[in-house]
Image (tube, rainbow, N blue to C red):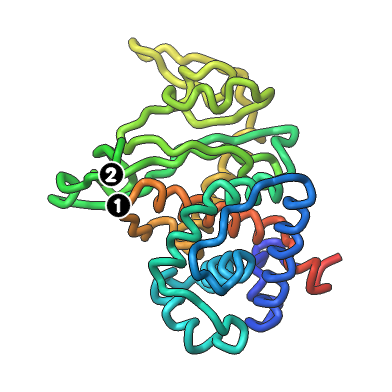
Amino acid sequence: MRQDREHPLYYLDAETLLVATYVWVDDELKALQTQGFKLPPKQRHQKATLAELLTLAIFLLLQGQDLAKGYLAAKTTLKAYFPSLPHLSRFYRVLQKAQGLLAHLAIRLSGGQGLLQVVDLKPIPLAHGHRVHGLSLPEAAVGVGPLGAFGGYVLMPVMNERGLFFRWALLPGNARETWGRDLVADLPAVLGDRGFRWVQGVKTPPYRARGGRLVETGWRGWMGKVRNWIETRFSVMVRSLGLHRIEARSYWGLVDRINLILVVHNLIRSRVLLRMAGVEL
């Protein structure tokens, strides 16, 4: 199996992928209930189960669809699998109530911190141009990303050596690397770019101080290749999972969308669905 083709749609048809996703979600929810984890309460008059709605949300992201458009289309095209889907607004409310559960699922998929960790910042633009001044979400701020000024937030995730995200924080758009020092304070071996040189415990490439003096940090050549892995994971979340096109109207709606994207990313990277379908042993 080619390492650069990890997405399950390379190997599974849509129906098999949908069934495998539902089996995984349902098994995980039952396991959490057995362990005493409290699931979000059922919404009033909610007919579709939590497992069905989470399955549909994950399936739409795996297909690269917009969540709203894909959900509205699924009420017709997937009616045989989901006969009692609620209104779109109720679907969003269920996801918002399940944002803590989604985070828990992403962490379970990651397998923990591992032996080596990588940290970086990823801008999440919610507005550009003159619209940045009309942003009313709490703690949203104007920052500068690869495409220029933007209004919104930045995601600060920590990845283990397996390419899975096990810890993250959502910070204002103008955040600096030092704002997330608590996120990596207890981790033993963390790699970051030069922006993290003021964060204790993070190893960074050599940098130049004022006056042009080169400050050595003990950086090795192989560390640069490992640190670049996180850029590849960011590309997957942007290109395939829509991290760059989140349209949130509330802070907690934004949080649940990010948690959902992290779940789907870890689900792809861990290849759990491929093993369930018998494609990979």
Q: Is residue 164 visible?
A: no
Tell me which residue sits at (38%, 57%) in the image.
244
Identity, as a three-letter code, of the amino acid under mark 1:
Leu
Q: Where's the N terminus, which quadrant?
A: bottom right
Residue found at x 48% / y 20%: 197
Q: Amino acid at mark 2?
A: Leu
Asked if residue 201 shows in the view, the reply is: yes
- Comparing labels 1 and 2, the label whose residue is closer to the camera: 2
* Residue 137 disc label: 2
Local SS, label 2: loop
Which percent across, then down, holds residue 209?
A: 39, 14
Q: Quadrant of the C terminus?
A: bottom right
Q: Which residue is mark 1?
A: 126
Measured as percent of width and height from the top left, residue 4 is found at 65, 63
Q: Is residue 35 above or below residue 45?
A: above
Residue 237, given in percent of the width and then of the height, sits at: 50, 57
